[in-house]
Image: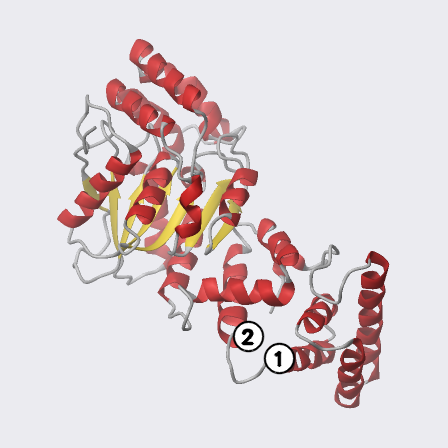
């Protein structure tokens, strides 16, 4: 095995100064760093004046990176990427990759956790496909070249109808790029993926992790991406609607929005004992609302709601609910009073359950609502009391303990607030 020689380049319009934050982008098998062109442009447009450096790296025999003949592993590709970063100034950096690029990014974050500030995994997994499938594709490329893959790649890479609707798009042009990839290098990449499986190591990830799936991706499906996310201590999942396996190429604006939110979240200082504000927020959120509720809310996240989900996780749960100045019991009392005053029915239902988890009795919850009626008025308090009675009845009917872990879904769960 050998470490391949890879080449990278700073994206145009980004700041080269070594002291500036660095984002490294890795492409998918059969594409080049150009896969990220639209995302980089959208990142620059959304953050004018940003000092972020964006370094993109090509895979072996792809784009500017030289072809290879010797075998290599995903771990050696990760070391090769790290070598490019060293040449660009070194230090810790943010990292994102798509498909094979995501597998390399995952490996790098696991092998060199001190170097990765945050991780974004687009349409990838800790093990992609099957060993036999990758070995068969490697053999097919050696026999017939990458040109033989164009039809199958078009079906895997893009959502139904996308190429017909966007025949001149960068995404469509990527199929022409596939033909130019060195055949042996492509085959070696397949063999590296055939041997790659980091599933058992996911629990040791410490960087905040954004997991992104494409709605129509049949390779790394949204369901598989949700399973991956659930195995990561500090991960959250979002699906980009209307896209398939090359989600960042099909909808670069959505990819840029998710990355922008993720990078901002990763930059926030964490409370003691937490890796990040997002990680601490997710921990507190699960402790108060229960895993079942949070899992449903996370599973319903879309590209449009992901920034809001991240906002409430970091600010509501990671900062306010995590403060020591009030106990969680006291915060439940304050929260219920505020929600009754505003007649926020969906959140009242959710926080009645949370109050039970935080140690309030049913009688105390009723007393909070009664007290709030004095200042908020009878109609909102009457409505809140009715909601509380229904929650209690549901718990009794289900034979469930007085906790937030109830199978009932909130009608506003996808946009759940703190």
| Badge 2: residue crowd in 10 Å (few <14, some 14–19, many ≥20) | many
Tell me if residue 215 can be seen. Answer: yes
Give the residue furthest to the top: 143
Q: Secondary structure at mark 2?
A: loop
Q: Is residue 383 above or below residue 29?
A: below
Residue 41 drawn at (x, y percent): 33, 48
Q: Are marks 2 and 1 in contact (CB under 8 Å)?
A: yes
Q: Quadrant of residue 93?
A: bottom left
For the residue pair 324 and 343, the one nearer the viewer reads as 324
Picture disc at residue 6 = none
- At x 72%, y 65%, the residue is 346
Quadrant into which the N terminus falls: top left
| Badge 1: residue crowd in 10 Å (few <14, some 14–19, many ≥20) | some
Mark 2 or mark 1, which has the lower sequence index?
Answer: 2
For the residue pair 283 and 25, the one nearer the viewer reads as 283
Residue 336 drawn at (x, y percent): 70, 77
- At x 61%, y 55%, the residue is 297
- At x 30%, y 35%, the residue is 74
- At x 23%, y 24%, the residue is 71
Quadrant into which the C terminus falls: bottom right
Q: Secondary structure at mark 1?
A: helix
Q: Is residue 386 above or below residue 279?
A: below
Please state if 66 lies on the left or on the right of 30 as rendered.
left
Residue 82 drawn at (x, y percent): 21, 45
Q: Is residue 77 above or below residue 287?
A: above
Please state if 365 lies on the left or on the right of 107 as rendered.
right
Question: Where does label 2 land, which residue?
Answer: 321
Residue 254 drawn at (x, y percent): 46, 48
Give the residue furthest to the bottom: 374
Between the residue at mark 2 and the residue at mark 1, the CA separation in whole angstroms equals 7 Å
Question: Where does label 1 land, which residue?
Answer: 331
For the residue pair 166 and 268, the one nearer the viewer reads as 268
């Amino acid at each position: 095995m050998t470490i391949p020689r890879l080449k990278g380049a700073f994206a145009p319009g980004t700041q080269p100064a070594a002291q500036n934050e660095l984002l490294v982008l890795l492409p998918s098998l059969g594409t080049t760093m150009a896969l990220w062109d639209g995302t980089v442009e959208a990142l620059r447009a959304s953050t004018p004046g940003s000092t972020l450096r964006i370094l993109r790296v090509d895979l072996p025999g792809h784009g500017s990176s030289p072809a290879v003949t010797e075998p290599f592993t995903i771990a050696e590709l990760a070391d090769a990427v790290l070598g490019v970063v060293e040449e660009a100034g070194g230090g810790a950096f943010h990292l994102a990759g798509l498909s094979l690029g995501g597998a390399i990014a995952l490996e790098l974050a696991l092998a060199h956790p001190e170097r990765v500030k945050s991780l974004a995994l687009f349409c990838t997994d800790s093990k992609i496909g099957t060993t036999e499938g990758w070995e068969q594709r490697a053999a097919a490329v050696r026999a017939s070249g990458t040109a033989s893959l164009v039809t199958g790649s078009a079906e895997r890479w893009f959502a139904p109808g996308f190429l017909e609707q966007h025949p001149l798009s960068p995404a469509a042009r990527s199929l022409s790029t596939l033909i130019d990839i060195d055949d042996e290098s492509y085959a070696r990449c397949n063999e590296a993926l055939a041997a790659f499986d980091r599933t058992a190591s996911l629990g040791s990830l410490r960087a905040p992790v954004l997991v992104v799936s494409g709605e129509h991706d049949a390779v790394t499906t949204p369901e598989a991406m949700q399973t991956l996310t659930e195995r990561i201590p500090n991960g959250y999942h979002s699906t980009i609607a209307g896209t398939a396996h090359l989600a960042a190429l099909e909808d670069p604006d959505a990819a840029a929005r998710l990355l922008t939110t993720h990078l901002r979240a990763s930059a926030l200082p964490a409370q003691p004992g937490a890796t990040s504000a997002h990680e601490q927020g997710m921990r507190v959120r699960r402790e108060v609302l229960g895993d079942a509720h949070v899992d449903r809310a996370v599973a319903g996240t879309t590209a449009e709601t992901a920034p809001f989900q991240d906002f409430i996780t970091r600010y509501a749960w990671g900062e306010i609910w995590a403060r020591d100045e009030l106990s969680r019991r006291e915060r439940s009392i304050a929260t219920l009073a505020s929600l009754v005053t505003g007649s926020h029915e969906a959140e009242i239902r959710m926080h009645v359950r949370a109050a039970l988890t935080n140690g309030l009795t049913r009688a105390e919850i009723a007393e909070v609502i009664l007290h709030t009626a004095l200042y908020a008025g009878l109609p909102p308090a009457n409505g809140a009391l009715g909601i509380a009675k229904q929650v209690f009845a549901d718990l009794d009917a289900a034979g469930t303990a007085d906790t937030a872990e109830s199978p009932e879904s909130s009608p506003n769960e996808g946009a759940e607030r703190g």
